[in-house]
Image (cartoon, rainbow, N blue to C red):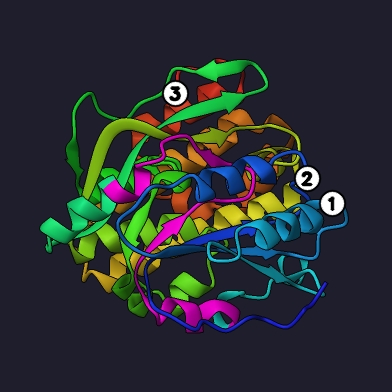
Amino acid sequence: MNSIIPQPHSNYKVIIKCYTYNHQKYIEDALKGFVMQKTNFPFCAIVVDDFSTDKTAEIIKKYEDHYPDIIKGFYLQENYLSQKKSKGPLIKPWFDRTEYIALCEGDDYWIDPYKLQKQVDWLDSHIDYTMCCTDAIISSPYGELDWHRYDNDSDITPESMIVGGGFYIQTATILYRKIINNYMNENFIRQCNTGDYSRQIMCSIKGKVRYLCNKTAVYRYQNPGSWSYNDIYGDKKKLIKNWRSVVNLLDGFDNYTSGNYSETIKYRKIDFITKKIINYKQIRPLLYNEFQDVLSLLSFKQKIKLFLCKHKLNFFS
């Protein structure tokens, strides 16, 4: 398979960004969701295989051969994920040729053939909005989870986006304006291991975010091989490092916004870390040691609740 990164030869209204690694069980669902889209504008899907060791790349190549105008495969010859390298520069020339960017990881997929059309129609007619996202189905090993964010089409405030964390909206439902990429090169953002959360916050403070209540995508949660599974069941020291990067990200946004959301950010940091302490009993001593800066923000009442939780009296909410 050719490892040369292809270059764009035309402009697209939307480019879909899809990163995948060892998603042999899932990637075909994602690709089917891309090629079934019905639009009145040109679009394509940049599918970056991060040097998978299974048959993920073969499946991508099969779809690329059948749908060359839509599927554009990038077959990396080293694992960027393990090397902590950014794939951004590899595909930047493509983003320069588009207006909107849609996101869908290789283990998630779309179920609405008009997903892109609906979201583009909204953003085209509302120039003060930077992002449009939707409801989603959550698929887990325990069955489909009953999840939705709002009962009606709604705006999402920066405060809600900050407090909600990276899972407040599902990545596979996001369409955002390319211009947001211009703001994603801040050091505090590039040093964070969770790019989705930083992008969502940035979109919400640079413009408005619209949530459409119809379900357009499926997010796989805790399925073996999925990103969420690795995040929960992966190496605990790496998890702590990731959580520290989230706290640093929030501190960075606090400075970036000149303290306009300080109370919201403080609440989010406390909520984020105390829940980790509650849920990860086996590494509590490590968490107490690593996040003293966050724990020092707790009120006296919150400290009492956390103390009771530590002693198996879980009152913390």
Residue drawn where x is 12% and y is 62% of the image: 128
Which quarter of the image is occupied by the C terminus?
top left
Q: Which residues are magenta?
A: 90-117
Based on the displayed image, in which of its 4 quarters is residue 276 positioned?
A: top right
Label 1: few (<14), some (14–19) or many (≥20) C-alpha neighbours in 10 Å: some
Q: Which is nearer the N-term, disc 1 or disc 2?
A: 2
Is residue 113 a member of the stretch shown in magenta?
yes
Circle 3 SS class: loop
Q: Are marks 1 and 2 in contact (CB under 8 Å)?
A: yes
Is residue 231 something one can see in this rendering?
no
Tell me, yes or no, if residue 316 can be seen here: yes
User: What residue is rendered at 76% in x and 52% in y?
Assistant: 59
| Relative horizontal placement of residue 2, taking residue 41 as reference (left or right) | right
Viewer-side residue, 65 vs 101 = 65
Residue marked by disc 2:
24
Where does residue 113 sit, x and y in percent of width and height?
41, 40
Q: Amino acid at mark 1?
A: Lys
Ranked by sequence position, the earlier of labels 1 and 3 is 1
Answer above or below: position of 5 versus 194: below
Q: Amino acid at mark 2?
A: Gln
* x, y percent for residue 258: 21, 71
Residue that badge 3 annotates: 316
